[in-house]
Image: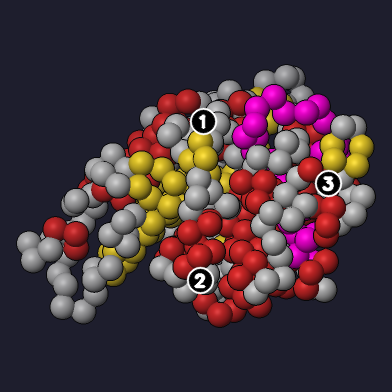
């Protein structure tokens, strides 16, 4: 559901979507877009072209981006449609499922608890949850909290146990965290030392609950969502419907005759993602969250440094040159430096973005799952273009 590579293993892309590009630009007081006073405050024609490519030659339903640049305000661009049945244009302000970007929220809470001396990063899972991981060769006495955060625990991903060719068979099921862990422990052992697993974050959610006495969703809400004023970010629980204005999400699924059919999968019970992939948010809220996180408003310096301590990530599970910290991904910028962020994939939605060294924040959403390598490359290229424009 959440790692970037799964989209490239999905079904063959067929069909195309409308590709008109709309831009909405907002500038800070005293700044005039395109005035020459600041190149960074000019428009983003290269980003508009990149959005057009995603919904044009790549054939995706819709794409939207929000760029927040210090001193220049906000620029938002869209292309394609939010609803393929009605032709309603894509918007940049709708609520979407953010998939594995949820992991960064959960990791932030764990690191806050570490700063409060309530969680030790090098303590074992068994220290907090005795006997939870104790079968099929998996041993919670040998897995640390840090390894869960960094995907070096050796735990498989329960998401791989789900039938992604026929998600309709289980999309209404209300999964519990314990059920997700059991699904994972039935899977073969990963072959690599770094192996992306949403199950790691399901277990972290259980640790949060054990330590605080509250659900991980309530702790994320209390510690992050409410203090930052993320009014469009929430946990859907078992409700399959996205509250408030939102685009529809689409995915190619097998039809009755065996061919692939572009299917509306907007309504989906996200309990299968749990503390590792269930959040609903907007592009603007995600930009605000990452600005606060990287800017040191959510974590003390020591814990933020821990979060930014990275290891190489599997490019087939994330993207080329990515390195994974503790719930945070670093990626080299084509214009120099590194950006910090995350990405997520759920049925019908793909999100990715982050924060550049100059403080510029970018978030991109697609409301159709990616089926081709070209579309995947263009998605990453769009984020790079947005973060590097005018630099």
Numbered disc in front, either 1 or 2:
2
**Do residues under tags 3 and 2 come within 8 Å of each other at their CB atoms?**
no
What distance separates the C-alpha of mark 3 from that of mark 2? 29 Å
* Quadrant housing residue 221: bottom right
- Name the residue tied to disc 2: 300
Report whether residue 257 is seen. Answer: yes
Front residue of 388/167: it is: 388
Placement of 329 over or under 317, stated as above or below: below
Badge 1 element: loop
What residue is rendered at 92% in x and 37% in y?
A: 135
Left/right placement of residue 79 relative to residue 303 reads left
Badge 2 element: loop
Residue 82, percent from left and from top? 51, 51
Q: State the mark number for residue 358.
A: none
* Quadrant housing residue 130: bottom right
Left/right placement of residue 118 relative to residue 224 reads right
Image quadrant occupied by the N terminus: top right
Numbered disc in front, either 3 or 2:
3
- Name the residue tied to disc 1: 315
Range of magenta residues: 182-209
- Name the residue tied to disc 3: 141
Placement of 171 over or under 254, stated as above or below: below
Sequence-first disc among 3 and 2 = 3
What distance separates the C-alpha of mark 3 from that of mark 1? 29 Å
What residue is rendered at 53% in x and 48% in y?
A: 325
The outermost residue toward the left is: 36
Front residue of 294/381: it is: 294
Residue 104, percent from left and from top? 58, 57
For mark 3, does the 10 Å Cα neighbourhood hold few (<14), some (14 to 19), or many (20 or more) residues?
A: some
What residue is rendered at 51% in x and 71% in y?
A: 300
* The magenta stretch spans residue 193: yes
């Amino acid at each position: 559901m959440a790692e970037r590579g799964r989209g490239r293993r999905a079904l063959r892309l067929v069909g195309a979507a409308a590709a008109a590009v709309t831009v909405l630009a907002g500038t800070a007081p005293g700044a005039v877009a395109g005035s020459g006073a600041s190149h960074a405050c000019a428009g983003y024609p290269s980003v508009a072209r990149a959005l057009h490519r995603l919904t044009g030659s790549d054939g995706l339903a819709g794409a939207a981006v929000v760029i927040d640049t210090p001193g220049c305000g906000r620029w938002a661009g869209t292309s394609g449609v939010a609803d393929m049945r009605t032709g309603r244009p894509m918007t940049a302000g709708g609520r979407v499922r953010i998939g594995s970007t949820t992991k960064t929220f959960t990791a932030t809470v764990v690191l806050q608890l570490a700063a409060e001396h309530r969680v030790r990063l090098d303590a074992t899972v068994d220290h907090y949850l005795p006997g939870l991981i104790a079968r099929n060769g998996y041993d919670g006495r040998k897995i640390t909290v840090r390894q869960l955060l960094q995907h070096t625990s050796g735990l498989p991903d329960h998401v791989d146990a789900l039938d992604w060719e026929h998600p309709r068979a289980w999309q209404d099921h209300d999964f519990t965290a314990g059920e997700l862990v059991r699904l994972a422990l039935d899977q073969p052992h990963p072959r690599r030392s770094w192996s992306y697993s949403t199950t790691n974050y399901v277990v972290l959610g259980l640790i949060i609950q054990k330590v605080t006495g509250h659900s991980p969703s309530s702790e994320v809400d209390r510690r992050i969502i409410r203090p930052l004023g993320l009014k469009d970010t929430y946990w859907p629980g078992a409700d399959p419907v996205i509250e408030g204005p939102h685009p529809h999400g689409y995915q190619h699924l097998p039809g009755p005759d065996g061919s692939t059919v572009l299917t509306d999968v907007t309504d989906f019970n996200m309990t299968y993602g749990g503390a590792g992939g269930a959040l609903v948010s907007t592009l603007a809220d995600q930009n605000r969250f990452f600005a606060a996180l990287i800017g040191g408003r959510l974590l003390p310096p020591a814990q933020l440094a821990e979060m930014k301590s990275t290891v190489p990530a599997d490019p087939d599970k994330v993207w080329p040159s990515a390195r994974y910290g503790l719930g945070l991904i670093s990626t080299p910028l084509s214009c120099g430096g590194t950006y910090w962020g995350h990405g997520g994939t759920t049925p019908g939605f793909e999100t990715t973005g982050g924060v550049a060294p100059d403080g510029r924040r970018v978030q991109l959403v697609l409301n159709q799952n990616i089926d081709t390598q070209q579309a995947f490359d263009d998605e990453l290229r769009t984020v790079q273009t947005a973060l590097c424009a005018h630099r």
